């Protein structure tokens, strides 16, 4: 999800990537969020297994889903959020996980994992846990309040952004109105739609990566953003701060999954198991500023990291947060509302 130093979304065909790799080397093709893994960890894996890792990037779960549904193949590992992994599994787009090939599963915090959508790890393995909140420029935003109501601030019109993500944006409006992120109640969804349409008048765009760059450069003053991205921004600009809205927000877990079309599943398992090693998981956490449910890796993290409320929110905050769930047939309600929001002038 997702750091400021965005690599442009690759449009290079997988077949071309294969041709460019050294002869005799296996190639692992991964479809991931941008800047969501430590390059040094990838290099270690390549050296250990004498292989090449090729990364392509998406900017939303819906974009990932749409590309695969349209027939894209050649990927060996994907990184959907939990609710999207469930959709993909039910539509037979991803494989069941063979636990016997992952000796490092024992490192996971299983009481935490049991709370996730795929609590038995039937088709997914957890990577990182994310929270959605608000990052802002302390010098530019006066009288900041940790609330989704900031998007009603007309004095900030044209200087704010929302994510280009239907579940997160509609979900924020639902929490603002006192509802659950996963509601399928038509009246509640209608109120959320009206709220986002009102907010739309005050924002510059729905965006992910340009929004982060814009906050860093001063083009934007306030953006909806994931916690790890915000911490990266703060590390580069001391004028930026981050808050989880008082009304509550989303909790999402991004997962490793192996698509049905994978041509190199054995190497995919080796990669997942490699990333579950405590030292490698630690290196990734330090790079992306998200918390992994890898208990052994957490033991290697600094106290400052583990007690940072933006990374590991306290229980009182978590009580107001909702896990993003798969809504089954009701997912179409969100898509239809999103289309109406986007078409509103």
Image: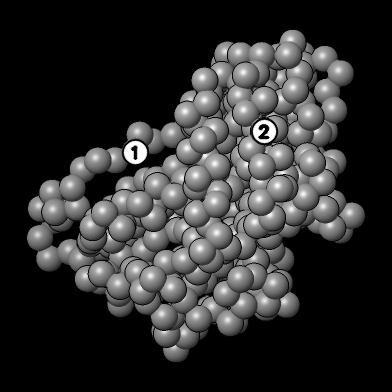
Which picture quadrant has residue 182? Answer: bottom right
Badge number at residue 194: 2
Badge number at residue 52: none
Q: Is residue 231 above or below residue 261?
A: above
Q: Which residue is located at x 39 percent, y 52 percent?
A: 64
Other residues around mark 2 within 10 Å, as few (<14) / some (14–19) / many (≥20): some
Other residues around mark 1 within 10 Å, as few (<14) / some (14–19) / many (≥20): few
Is residue 51 visible in the rendered structure shown here?
yes
Which is more toward the observer, 1 or 269? 1
* Alpha-carbon span between mark 2 and mark 1: 32 Å
Badge number at residue 9: 1
> Percent x, y for residue 77?
36, 64
> Percent x, y for residue 213?
53, 24
> Percent x, y for residue 49?
30, 68
> Percent x, y for residue 131?
68, 49
Q: Which residue is located at x 30 percent, y 72 percent?
A: 260
Q: Which residue is located at x 71 percent, y 48 percent?
A: 187
> Which residue is situated farthest in the front direction here?
187
- Which of disc 1 and disc 2 is earlier in sequence? 1
């Amino acid at each position: 999800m997702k750091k400021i130093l965005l690599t442009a979304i690759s449009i290079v065909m997988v077949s071309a990537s294969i041709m460019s790799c050294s002869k005799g080397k296996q190639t692992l093709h991964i479809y991931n969020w941008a800047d969501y893994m430590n390059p040094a960890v990838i290099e270690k894996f390549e050296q250990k297994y004498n292989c090449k890792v090729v990364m392509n990037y998406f900017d939303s779960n819906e974009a990932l889903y749409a590309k695969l549904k349209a027939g894209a193949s050649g990927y060996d590992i994907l990184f959907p959020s939990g609710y999207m992994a469930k959709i993909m599994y039910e539509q037979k787009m991803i494989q069941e996980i063979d636990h016997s090939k992952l000796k490092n599963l024992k490192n996971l915090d299983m009481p935490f994992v049991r709370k996730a959508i795929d609590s038995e790890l039937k088709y997914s393995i957890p990577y990182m846990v994310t929270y959605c909140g608000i990052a802002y420029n302390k010098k530019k935003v006066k009288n900041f309040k940790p609330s989704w109501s900031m998007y009603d601030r007309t004095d900030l019109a044209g200087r704010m952004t929302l994510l280009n993500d239907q579940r997160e944006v509609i979900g924020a409006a639902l929490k603002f109105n006192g509802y659950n992120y996963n509601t399928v109640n038509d009246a509640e969804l209608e109120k959320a739609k009206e709220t986002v349409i009102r907010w739309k008048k005050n924002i510059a765009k729905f965006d992910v990566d340009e929004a982060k760059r814009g906050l860093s450069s001063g083009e934007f003053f306030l953006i909806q953003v994931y916690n790890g991205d915000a911490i990266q921004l703060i590390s580069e600009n001391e004028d930026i701060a981050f808050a989880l809205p008082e009304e509550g927000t989303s909790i999402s877990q991004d997962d490793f999954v192996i698509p049905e079309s994978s041509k190199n599943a054995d190497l995919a398992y080796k990669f997942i198991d490699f990333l579950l090693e405590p030292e490698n998981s630690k290196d990734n956490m330090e790079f992306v500023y998200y918390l992994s449910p890898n208990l052994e890796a957490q033991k290697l993290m600094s106290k400052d990291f583990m007690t940072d409320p933006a990374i590991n929110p306290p229980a009182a905050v978590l009580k107001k947060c909702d896990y993003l769930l798969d809504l089954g047939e009701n997912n179409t309600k969100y898509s239809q509302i999103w289309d109406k929001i986007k078409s509103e002038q």
